Image (tube, helix red, strand yellow):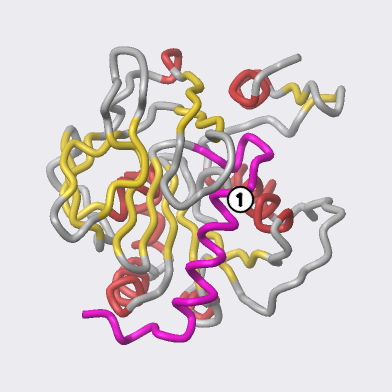
Amino acid sequence: MLTPLQAWTTGVDDRRGRPTAPRTDRAEDRLGLEFRPISSTAVPSHDLQVGVLALQGDVREHLAALAIVGVTGRIVRRERELAEVDGLIIPGGESTTIVKLAHHFDLFEPLRQRIAAGLPTYGSCAGMILLADRILDAPADQDTFGGIDMTVRRNAFGRQVESFEERVQIDGIEGAPITAVFIRAPWVEEAGPAATVLARVDTGPAAGRIVAVRQQHLLATSFHPELTGDARVHQYFVDMVEHGAHIEGQTE
């Protein structure tokens, strides 16, 4: 039986006994995958409109995780699509590429403004970097959408060949620890007073490192919960959206 990380990196989904769609960092190829229908037995039970920023990264996997918790996700690439959602997920991928494409699609400033105005937003891996107010080991000119009072170090856990899985307990999520998949993952070097630390790595050389943070309407994780089939992080975020959809624009 393959682990979620092995299935992702090899392109073989052992749970279904057949190859998965190949992964690629090329935005045009990834977007071709994102528009394929997502199969799920879940029946949408929410009227919420949760978008997934579909410029590059694990868009399809986040849409599938939203379907598990009864939410129909929406692809966001244009400002008009952004205006129609109650919450947004910024997926893992390559943070510099996502920023370049956001500028290309004239989406960077609208995104930054809506996040600042209170749009509930969840960033995983590269999404965590893009929600950070401060970043380390990044190109000098790299922009972020910002919003969380934290300093994030890019690729802190090492190269892709050093990717790993770890059981992580997240404050506010009941039950057993979740399986966290770290792929060229960042960690939070420092969380400022406005941010709340939700999870740390418990074991190994990175023990004590911060890997999940929340600040008001914003949530960020170093890892990829969308790759595991455990949708509790997405349910946590949907609960945030249900509350935050009514108070956007009232953040301090």
Amino acid type of the residue that numbered disc 1 sits on in the rendered structure: His
Q: Write down the region rendered in magenta.
A: 224-252
Q: Quadrant of residue 11?
A: top right
Residue located beneath label 1 in the image: 62
Viewer-proximal residue among 43 and 184: 43
Residue visible at 56% across and 65% down in the picture: 238
Viewer-proximal residue among 114 and 165: 165
Q: Is residue 174 above or below residue 193?
A: above
Q: Is 74 situated left or right of 79 in this image?
A: right
Q: Is residue 190 above or below residue 218?
A: above
Q: Quadrant of residue 216?
A: bottom left
Residue that extends furthest to the front in the rendered view of this protein = 175
Residue visible at 66% across and 57% down in the picture: 66
Assign the C terminus to one quadrant of the image. bottom left
x, y (%) of residue 63? Answer: 66, 55
x, y (%) of residue 206? Answer: 29, 20
Residue visible at 36% across and 17% down in the picture: 203
Q: Is residue 135 magenta?
A: no
Viewer-proximal residue among 160 and 211: 211
Label 1, secondary structure: give it. helix
x, y (%) of residue 140? Answer: 12, 42
x, y (%) of residue 98? Answer: 40, 50
Q: Is residue 229 magenta?
A: yes
